[in-house]
Image: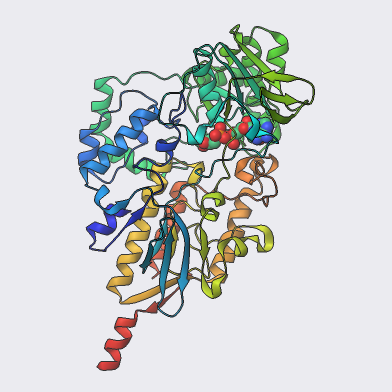
Amino acid sequence: MLYRLREAGFSTCVFETGDNVGGTWYWNRYPGARCDVESIYYNYTFSEELLKEWTWSAKYAEQPEILSYINFVADKFDLRKDIQFKARVDSAQFDEEGNRWTIQLNNGQIVSARYFITGVGCLSASNVPKFKGLESFQGEWYHTGRWPHEKVDFSGKRVGIIGTGSSGIQSIPAIAKEAEQLLVFQRTPQYSIPARNVLNDPDYIQQIRENYEEIKKNMRKSLTGIPMEPRNRSALDDTPEERRQLFEAAWEQGGLLSLSYAYNDLAIKPEANETVAEFIRSKIRRIVKNPEVAEKLLPSYFYGTKRPIIDTDYFETYNRDNVTLVDVKSAPIQEIIPAGLRTADAEYELDIIVFATGFDAMTGPLFKMDIRGREGVSLKEKWAEGEQTRTYLGISTAGFPNMFMLTGPESPSVLSNMMVSIEQHVEWVSDCINYMRDHHKGVIEANVEAENAWTKHCREVAEPTLYVKTDSWYMGANIEGKARGFQIYLGGVGPYRQICDDVAEKGYEGFTLQASEESVVNELIQ
Ligand code: NA7
């Protein structure tokens, strides 16, 4: 966003809480952290030079490599000179007199800007559950999403990890190799399939480079930003043996979408979903040697309705002597005690606790700032009304003029390859700001009717799917007291881009654009 606006001649400043670039890849430094989108699709595509000059070492890049890449991009385009680090935005208020945003930083600085763009991510507000007694714990504790920059030494330690989402499943095998004992406190068993990570072959990379224009086109028009489409067949149209063979091949292939895309109705029909769910359960039973432990690891929610997870040796890790699975569904964690933690039926002594307990997703990062639009109404208040987020295209919201949200709620965001979705929003928002300048407009604001129609459309697309039947962070269900509702646009990255482009082509249909003060003054003079 900074690069595009700067290139277009706008004076632009970025405020960043961290002391360097990287965002999610700056904060999530836990052992085993890795991207689950193939590296060749998880990069910027706006610059040919970047594509030529950077080579990913493996099919799935590890966090340090992704962070190096982001630093490489920042160096290449000299981005840091317009980024203020260690600067958190406390509040942003729209001033209706001057049609400008007043942005207050935690260091006391106050900034005035024509446009206010949020690039705060969907998963940056880490969630440490409010366990009684945490402050009394005598050991060390860490959240995976706020991992220290120094290495955490697990050797000779009794480590407890709470949470088995993507972060838990990536870090459990890595921590198990180092710790003396690892206790996994699991509330919901998860489906996970092998990533099958491999080093990238130089010939393969060469081939990708030569065909990148085509690959980029396919990424942009795909459903998820990854150039793959679901097989056009119902799981219920195949015999059990045909399905088994197909699932086996997908399991061998590994990766994020191989099983989800084996049939076109796995996310819609419960009976179709059960076929893939039972296939994964059969794999878990086979991999985990202790049948009692295997039984506790069997998931029962609809496969794919929580973020699909890919792993390296996750279920195999439970065959190690130093790893114990503790079911905290049947006996929940009651409190943290100085020596460890207590569940409803036992006490566990721990030297280190790792919270892999996720994030207040989607709205959490926005609500950490006190954002106020017209008449001083806060975003939090607006979205609390009717208990749901309301946006137009997931980019803007009525009553908050000249504010844009990159990968905001009700856009494809976390159900897509984030790089593709971020670039699409960056292009759309910078084109819009250019249009405003070229047409002497000063204020752009989503209309309430357009917003209501978009929010309704988002709900209608999600409603027939199984996503809405599972308690997940997609639904806001992981945060106590948070309103439930599916906050992501499920219509697909390609169709969504088309909708956004059509809106722009029709002169920003659904928005009200006002002339800028300068052009009004000029007209009066003439
Ligand atoms: P997730 O996917 O939200 O996982 C959090 C895990 O923590 C999940 O297993 C939760 O169980 C568990 N949890 C949360 N609170 C508690 C309490 N109070 N007690 C026990 N267990 C708890 O977060 P991740 O960081 O793994 O992944 C987030 C996304 O980052 C991921 O999907 C990728 O898109 C990247 P639950 O399932 O709620 O029962």
Q: Is residue 511 above or below residue 109?
A: below
Image height of 96 relative to 136, above or below: below
- Horizontal relation, residue 380 to residue 113: left or right: right
The quarter of the rendered structure image containing the C terminus is bottom left
Nearer the observer, 521 or 481: 481
- Measured as percent of width and height from the top left, residue 378 is found at 56, 65
Residue 234 visible in the snapshot: no
Residue 204 in the image: state x and y as whole percent.
Answer: 28, 23
x, y (%) of residue 457?
Answer: 59, 58
Q: How many marks?
A: 0
Q: Quadrant of residue 277?
A: top right
Residue at 23%, 41% (x, y): give it: 75
As drawn, is 327 to the left or to the right of 34? right
Please state which of residues 318 and 309 is positioned toward the viewer in this rendering. 318
Q: In this rendering, does residue 448 appear at all? A: yes
Residue 192 is situated, as x and y percent measured from the top left of the image, at: 57, 24
Question: Relative to residue 311, is residue 113 drawn left or right?
Answer: left
Q: Residue at left 69%, top 19%?
A: 348
Instruction: Examine the rendered structure and indicate whether residue 256 appears above or below residue 452.
Output: above
